[in-house]
Amino acid sequence: MGRGRQKAKHTKLARELKSFSPTVNYSALERELGHPSDDENEYVDKWADMYGDESDEDEDEYQAQKA
C-alpha cells in the first residue's frame, strides 16, 4: 500500500524539478572554469624541491650494492 504514496512523492518531486530554474552567475562560473592566462605556473609542484629525485637515490643505492 505504500507504493501509491511513494509514487506520488516521486511525481511531486519530478514536477518541482521540471519547473526549477536557478539563477546562474555566468561571469563567476567563467572565472572559476577559465584558464588563467597570466599564471602559467599553476601546475608547478610546490613541494618538489623538498624531496630529492627518487631515480637518483635508487641509482646511488644500486651503485653502492654493486661495489
Image: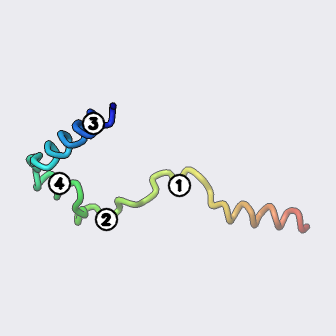
Q: Is residue 59 left or right of residue 14?
A: right
Query: Mark 3 — residue?
Result: 4
**Viewer-proximal residue among 37 and 7:** 7
Q: Is residue 7 above or below residue 18?
A: above
Q: Which circle, 3 or 1, is nearer the viewer?
A: 3
Distance Cα–Cα, label 3 vs label 4? 41 Å
User: Which of disc 1 and disc 3 is earlier in sequence?
Assistant: 3
Distance Cα–Cα, label 1 vs label 4? 34 Å
Secondary-structure class at tag 2: loop
User: Which of disc 3 and disc 2 is earlier in sequence?
Assistant: 3
Q: Which mark is residue 66?
A: none
User: Which of disc 4 and disc 1 is earlier in sequence?
Assistant: 4
Categorize mark 4 by other alpha carbons within 10 Å: few (<14), some (14-19), many (20+).
Answer: few
Q: Which image quadrant is residue 27 in?
A: bottom left
Query: Mark 2 — residue?
Result: 40
* Residues under numbered marks 2 and 4 in contact, where contact means CB atoms less than 8 Å apart: no
Distance Cα–Cα, label 2 vs label 4? 20 Å
Q: What is the three-letter code of the residue carrying label 1?
A: Asp
Query: Mark 4 — residue?
Result: 29
Residue drawn at x 91%, y 67% is 67
Q: What is the three-letter code of the residue carrying label 2?
A: Glu
**Viewer-proximal residue among 52 and 29:** 29
Residue drawn at x 83%, y 67% is 63
Categorize mark 3 by other alpha carbons within 10 Å: few (<14), some (14-19), many (20+).
Answer: few
Q: What is the three-letter code of the residue carrying label 3?
A: Gly
Query: Mark 1 — residue?
Result: 49
Secondary-structure class at tag 4: helix
* Residues under numbered marks 3 and 1 in contact, where contact means CB atoms less than 8 Å apart: no
Q: Which circle, 2 or 3, is nearer the viewer?
A: 3
Q: Which image quadrant is residue 26 in?
A: bottom left
